[in-house]
Amino acid sequence: MTALPTLRHRTALLQTAPAAGMLLIHEIYRSLQGESRYAGWPCVFIRTAVCNLRCSWCDTPHAFKEGQWLAREEVLQRALAFQTPLVELTGGEPLLQAETLPLMRELCERGKTVLLETSGAADIAAVDPRVHIIMDLKCPDSGEVARNRWANLEVLKPSDAIKFVVASRRDFDWACEVIRQHRLDERFEVLFSAVFGAVPLVELAQWILASHLQVRMQLQMHKYIWDPKARGV
């Protein structure tokens, strides 16, 4: 793995790929999808390196500092080799790397159902419309609420999803206000996740029921099957 420089230098790093058509990849592996409407399905994960946010509860900080330059064609072939219909690009933040856009398009053209996990701080306008976007809106306790790109709400498709990761009742109340203000539960699938170990699941369930919003509570399934700190699952 290549040791990555500090956050301040991340953009320069991604602009210094050893050749055109290269991606900085943290890992490629097959596991069960742990979240979203696809939870429980076998899925190939392509985890890109580098992120421009530093959420207080981030569970993949290793993706900030570890990565390997791979040709986009090699990434594509590694993903296809698993012979799995579902493929997700995650990170890090995939949209920091321009080569993820043609990669997602190529995966779609190979007949894959493609998911994109993105923080919502990056512009999603150029993402292939066949891709199912799962976009975070960062809540206050993440420390990154100011980075939300609200213009993305006008780009998302009805088949896309918005995810709120809540670390407190304050986060939940903020999310509910945003959902009502923008009618998100009428326009998209809305997902609620609890920061692992921070909010008791029974409390989140009770909050959702009391809110009368049409939203889905989800668990990070992989953290209940494997060690919560395990990689490659």
Image (cartoon, rainbow, N blue to C red):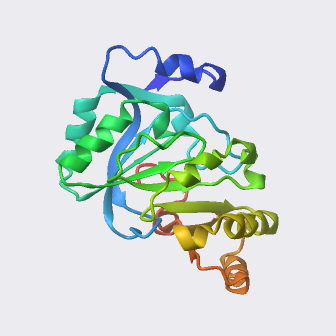
Residue occupying the point 64% across, 49% down: 150
Image quarter for residue 202?
A: bottom right
Looking at this view, is 233 or 179 the one in front? 179
Horizontal relation, residue 89 to residue 139: left or right = left
Looking at this view, is 226 or 151 the one in front? 151
Location of the N terminus by quadrant is top left
Q: Position of residue 197 (x, y in %)?
A: 68, 65
Residue 15 appears in the figure: yes
| Extreme residue in the right direction | 170
Looking at this view, is 159 or 202 the one in front? 159
Residue occupying the point 17% across, 49% down: 110
Q: Position of residue 116 (x, y in %)?
A: 42, 50
Image quarter for residue 218?
A: bottom right
**Total labels drawn:** 0
- In the image, residue 108 sits, relative to residue 69, either above or below, namely below
Residue occupying the point 55% across, 22% down: 11
Horizontal relation, residue 219 to residue 84: left or right = right
| Extreme residue in the front direction | 154
Horizontal relation, residue 233 to residue 82: left or right = right
- In the image, residue 134 sits, relative to residue 179, either above or below, namely above
Location of the C terminus by quadrant is bottom left
Looking at this view, is 225 or 198 the one in front? 198
Residue 219 appears in the figure: no
Q: Where is residue 34 in the image (x, y as percent from the top left)?
A: 45, 64
- In the image, residue 207 sits, relative to residue 24, either above or below, namely below
Q: Position of residue 2 (x, y in %)?
A: 45, 23
Image quarter for residue 26?
A: top left
